[in-house]
Image: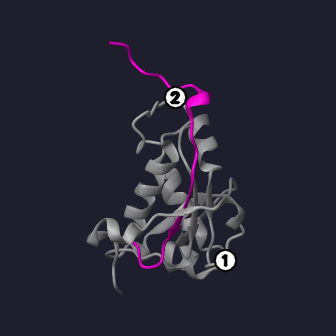
Amino acid sequence: MKTFSATPADVDKKWILIDAEGVVLGRLASIIAMRLRGKHKASFTPSMDMGDNVIVINAEKVQMTGNKRDEKYYWHTGFVGGIKERTKGEILEGKHPERVLMKAVQRMLPGGPLSKRQMTHLRVFAGTEHGMEAQKPEVLDVKAMNKKNTRTA
């Protein structure tokens, strides 16, 4: 028996559209990370970029459980005393609410050059409008997958 290893000719990429309204952030991010890597396919090869292209709309309406809305993201400017912090709630209400979802997905992918390339296949939009109609994306209903994926606030 031989082990199957995919080649670039074997890769079949699809476009997937996900509506994030009312979906729990961590569950959504894990589903997106799995789709970006291609682990949902039977021909998954860890060293190949086999994942699909994912479009997420309504990222500003994503839900969080518990007190996760008050958890902080920290970064340092490089100057003395330059530690900065911002809560997830402040980011969601700010200018770029899609960054919370982007960061959650990025942290669920393994580090390295391959995951950086896979992150380029993710498009996140804060509202309902996206300019990807020409790709004819298939709708993936995350809410119907599991009742725990949604949260009513």
* Quarter location, residue 71: bottom left
Residue occupying the far top of the picture: 1
The crowding category of the residue bearing disc 2, from other C-alpha atoms within 10 Å (few below 14, some 14 to 19, many at least 20), is few
* Camera-nearest residue between 38 and 114: 38
Q: What segment is highlighted magenta in the picture? A: 1-23
Spot occupied by residue 127 in the image (x, y as percentages of width and height): 62, 79
Residue 20 vertical placement versus 42 (above, below): below
Q: Is residue 153 left or right of residue 44?
A: left
Residue at 62% x, 80% y is 94
Spot occupied by residue 31 in the image (x, y as percentages of width and height): 42, 56
Residue 46 vertical placement versus 135 (above, below): above
Mark pair 1, 2: CA separation:
34 Å
* Camera-nearest residue between 54 and 95: 54
Amino acid type at circle 1 is Glu
Residue 109 within the segment the image draws in magenta:
no
Residue tagged 1: 129
Disc marking residue 2 = none
Q: Is residue 79 left or right of residue 50?
A: right
* Camera-nearest residue between 85 and 59: 59
Residue tagged 2: 47
